[in-house]
Amino acid sequence: MHRSSGAMASNDKKEFLNKCRDIKNTLVGLLDDQKEFRREMMDYNSRIAHGRSTIAMNNRENSPQLASADEEEEGSSDEDGRHNTSSEEESEESDEMTGEGATPSKQEEIRKPITVRDYPISETFSIWKCAVCKKEIKGRWQNRQSHIKVHEYLNVSCPVGRCSMTLAHTSLRNHLKMKHNMTCNVLPSREKALLQKELDRNNEIVMNCELKYFPPTSFISFSETALKEAVKPFCKKCGKRCIELQSRRDHVALKLKVTMDCPVRGCPYGGCYGAMWTHLKQKHQKKLSDLNRAERERFDNAKDKFYKKVDIAMPKFFS
């Protein structure tokens, strides 16, 4: 009897281990599928981009790459709307530009292979929906990466001694400049190494969490906003030119005297969205990713009310 129960326990253990291996293999397969799907998506979008007119393509190649606001959205970033990143969520990275003095042949050599040059361009048309909060994130992987960091509260510690501040890594440059009057480049090698270690840890966590927030099924479509009829950028009341949606919203808000309250408790400041960004940075040394949960909730509520009031009146000023 004892032997029989021992054999059953052994069989149960083997069956459990087999199931664990199956689950592991399934997860590995999903990760591989995710990577393959992203490659195929980028290839497909690149073919669409190359199908455009030669003139449009040349104009795109010779114009500067726009830095992603997800992060760093500072007023016109993707976090400005429901279809954008947080850019707080905030990527401060900018693409390298070809020197103005380079000859056409040298520029062509720099752009090879084309797929490397076109990758960040074509991916900016993709739209993904976060599986957790259902927010739509548009643009490059860095935008989704910044969005995941907000969910996971992945901050870094200020590397300056005796400073206990923790903040999003995209806010670190501004913090060092305003609080310590220095830049990352002048940090001692030890502090640089510690900071890099934190960044590497956060990036590893983000990669491990990718399927949780952006599985292959979270991809929605490619943006077709470029094909839609553009809104005339001139205010019908005063003629001021406002190209970006957020600048038009802030312009209308100023006309209507609509404001949103500062999310930091005890602060009486109120202003439009762009002014609020400047206020948070200069007064509180914070971006969206630096706000705690209560502050972020107050900010989102204030923003939603602000957008609702402004968007209703928008056609009177821009159409």
Image (tube, rainbow, N blue to C red):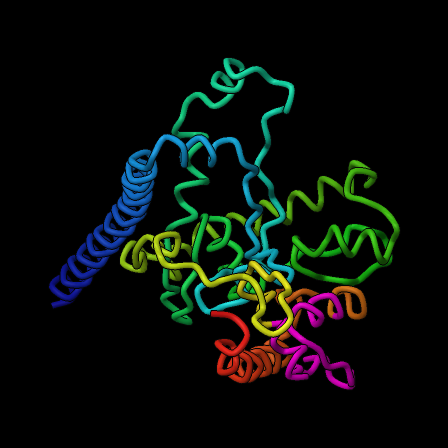
Q: Which residues are magenta?
A: 250-279
Residue 211 position, x and y percent, is 36, 56
Which residue is at a point 77% across and 43% down the rendered structure image?
Answer: 184
Left or right of residue 230, residue 5 in this image: left
Residue 179 in magenta?
A: no
Residue 172 position, x and y percent, is 72, 53
Asked if residue 260 shows in the view, the reply is: no
Q: Front-most of 89 and 11?
A: 89
Across the whole image, how many numbered discs are drawn on residues?
0
Asked if residue 92 shows in the view, the reply is: yes
Residue 180 position, x and y percent, is 87, 53
Which residue is at a point 29% across and 35% down the rendered structure image?
Answer: 51
Asked which quadrant contains residue 213, the reply is bottom left
Residue 268 in magenta?
A: yes
In this view, 241 is above or below 24: below
Residue 195 position, x and y percent, is 70, 46
Left or right of residue 280, residue 298 in this image: left
Asked which quadrant contains residue 45, the reply is top left
